[in-house]
Image (tube, rainbow, N blue to C red):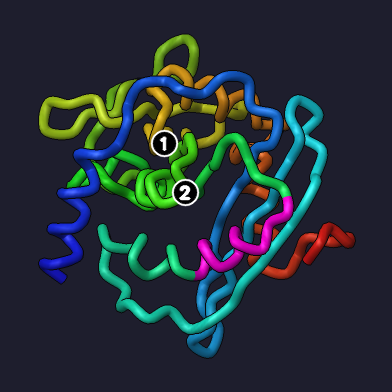
Amino acid sequence: MQHARDIQRHLAGRVIGRNELGAPVLIAGVDISGERDGVAVAAVVVLRHPQMELVEVQVAEGRPGFPYVPGLLSFRESPLIIAACEKLSHEPDLLLVDGQGVAHPRRLGIASHLGLLFDLPSIGCAKSILCGKHGPLDEEGQAELIDAGEVVGMAVRTKGSARPVYVSIGHKVDLPAAVYWVRQCCRGDRLPEPTRLAHLAAGGRLKGDFGV
């Protein structure tokens, strides 16, 4: 486990926190299902912006080869996600991940890890906090997420009075761009459309023939 933590600390120094993302056309969302009989399913969906038209869906399933350890989930989940992404026939411009980016104790959550592996702009959009705290949301429905005196992300309310999501830099984006694109991808739900559909696909609940 210590070796995995050392890898995270090393890779965190390679994360690019400036915005290198222009106007993405193809936006991918990734998620992984809970295990059933020890088998998990990873899904990647590709949507065309701004229509949020579903272009492609791919899945991969298998038994995770790394134990469940909070803070080290990328080592458990990434191999299956990578296997799903390697099936894609459309190369995305942006990767939106259901998980943390730099809002992580060692500043390398799964969104940053995948961004580095694929050399793609990536954004973490998590449903809960892994590290840090924030105050009340402002008039725009946002509040900085702060850990050890550092802004590591943003709590963002994306729908009415729903609980916020937690947005952080993955790779090759800055925080304002990350928040902007998460909001751009929301279509009346708390979760952005790419990760919402990836969650459905991982659970076998996304209907239609989209390359699965």
Span highlighted in magenta in the image: 80-89
Q: Considering the whole magenta stretch, tell me its main secondary structure.
A: helix
Whether 211 is among the magenta residues is: no
**Quadrant in which the C terminus is drawn:** bottom right
57 displayed left or right of 19: right
Check disc 1 and give the amino acid type. Tyr
Q: Secondary structure at mark 2?
A: helix
Residue 95 visible, this orientation = yes
Give percent across and percent down for residue 151: 24, 25
Which residue does the numbered mark 1 point to in the structure image?
A: 166
Most distant residue in the top direction: 139
Most distant residue in the bottom direction: 37
Which residue does the numbered mark 2 point to in the structure image?
A: 118
Q: Nearer the viewer, residue 149 or 21?
A: 21
Give percent across and percent down for residue 56: 77, 52
31 up-or-down from 64: above or below = above
Q: What residue lies at 32% left-to-right and 27% top-to-bottom? A: 17
Check disc 2 and give the amino acid type. Phe
185 displayed left or right of 75: right
**How far apart, in angstroms, are the residues tagged by discs 2 and 1?**
22 Å
Q: What residue lies at 53% left-to-right and 90% top-to-bottom? A: 37
Say which quarter of the image contains residue 74: bottom left
Give percent across and percent down for residue 126: 44, 44
First-in-chain label (2 vs 1): 2
- At label 2, counting other C-alpha atoms closer than 10 Å, the crowd grade (few under 14, some 14-19, many 20 or more) is some
Q: Secondary structure at mark 1?
A: strand
**Quadrant in which the N terminus is drawn:** bottom left
36 up-or-down from 123: above or below = below
Q: Nearer the viewer, residue 161 or 130?
A: 130
- At label 1, counting other C-alpha atoms closer than 10 Å, the crowd grade (few under 14, some 14-19, many 20 or more) is many
Q: Nearer the viewer, residue 87 or 126?
A: 87
